[in-house]
Amino acid sequence: MDKSDERYILVVDDDAGQRSLLESFLRSQGFAVATAASGQEALDILAARPPAMLISDVRMPGMSGFGLLECASQRRPGLPVLLVTAYADIRGAVGAMRGGAVDYLEKPIDLDELHAIVRRALGINNPLAAVSSIEYAIPEGIVAHSAAMRETLREAALAAPSDTRLLITGESGTGKEVVADLIHRWSARAAAPFVKVNCAAIPENLLESELFGHEKGAFTGAIARRIGRFEEADKGTLLLDEIGEMPPVLQAKLLRITQDGTFNRVGSNAEQKTHVRVLAATNRDLEREVAEGRFREDLYYRLNVMEIHVPPLRDRKADIVPLAHRFAAELGKGKCRFSPGAMSCMELYEWPGNVRELRNAVERAVLLARGEVILPEYLPKRVQQSLPDADSSKPVAGQQMNDIERAAILKALRENGFNRTETARALGISRRTLAYRLREYRAMGYPVDGEQPD
């Protein structure tokens, strides 16, 4: 293998969206990438130009990832193979590691973990991962002073150029729709339509027609043909907000259109085709919804090729005051300013309603201040009460708890060889929670990928 092939990776997946995501990410990190849609196509590429590493999905029509691993190991002994697997396949993936796989990566994909595994497998010693260097321009009006929010926007910018489906998660009011808008704006589809559907705001008996359209006479009141949101968004992006509220019967129809882009209008047998990128957003824990039988597992993995998590406002303290200044300028025509006491109250309050609650609080304060200085008493009572007494040790105690939690997580991470899936299982937390914490710790300078600081 010549020098140029040392960073050449073959990605195998029957899902075009996931192939696109992995290819664009790995290329952004300086790797050469070939892709294959099946195990047989991968073996043909393997024979023509052997890669330095192979990354394969487990569940594929025909030859599975396990079968590909076996064939690849026979033809290219010592070839590093990384398996991408759903939760149900983990037992088999662990067994496959005895058959030659270097590791397995659980869906939805954590790109930081992927990059760390690839570096280790290829022997690339790069303490400061290139993943942190992706450049993007934060548009005017978007507040992202905190490391947590910048990390979210970095991931959004990384995923935007691909056509892959993304799941945007976060509590109500955190700004999931804003992030979805940026993903569309940064994508190659920016000039095409960006259509939004709130699945929780439309009655169940009308949601199918809203999404897929209907023919004249399909039901009482259908006086003319109407195209649905999937047709309206053709060649663009469709945001399915509050996807966790979608009824089961429509989940099956959504699975079909995300697989091959085909659907039927209500009242018609004629098959329609659309080429749309689907973004889904939710404030629910869809992993739990799947486990409890309220959300289809196959649809969950179909929509969640990569998860973009929007952190709550309490975890992005550096954004609170800049957001408040922005809202005050909009609502008060630039006349209002905050007193130091008011800013302290806002920074200490937990904001359970997130950015939406902050905006409402600022609007109230602007009205009471009448264009003058905004004092603590103009803020809602619950916000005022966040300011501790002079002898209060609450912030210190909270900081001590953060230190204890960080030490426990980093210790477990080291004990599990920096494998995030095993670390999350050992700690009894979700991979999503662990990934979010590790992003915070990386921004603070702690080693989270096995590298050691200089």
Image (tube, grey):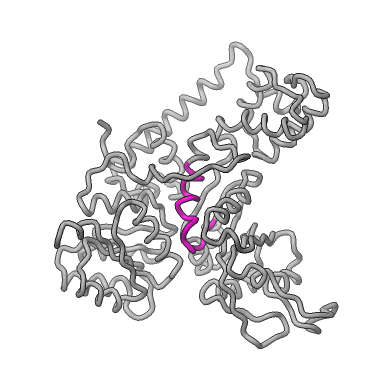
Tell me the residue at 37%/48% (across/down). Answer: 112
On screen, 373 above or below 282?
above
- Residue 7 % position (x, y): 24, 56
In the shown orientation, is residue 99 left or right of residue 230?
left
Magenta highlight on residue 143:
no
In the image, 415 versus 222, the foreground residue is 222
- The answer to whether residue 434 is visible is no
The total of numbered circles placed on residues is 0
- Residue 62 % position (x, y): 35, 81
Q: Which residues are magenta?
A: 151-167
On screen, 417 above or below 266?
above
In the shown orientation, is residue 355 left or right of residue 149?
right
Q: Quadrant of residue 377?
A: top right
On screen, 418 above or below 196?
above
Tell me the residue at 20%/60% (across/down). Answer: 5
Magenta highlight on residue 164:
yes
- Residue 178 % position (x, y): 62, 48
Tell me the residue at 51%/74% (across/down). Answer: 259
Q: Quadrant of residue 267?
A: bottom right
Tell me the residue at 65%/22% (across/down). Answer: 343
- Residue 227 % position (x, y): 72, 75
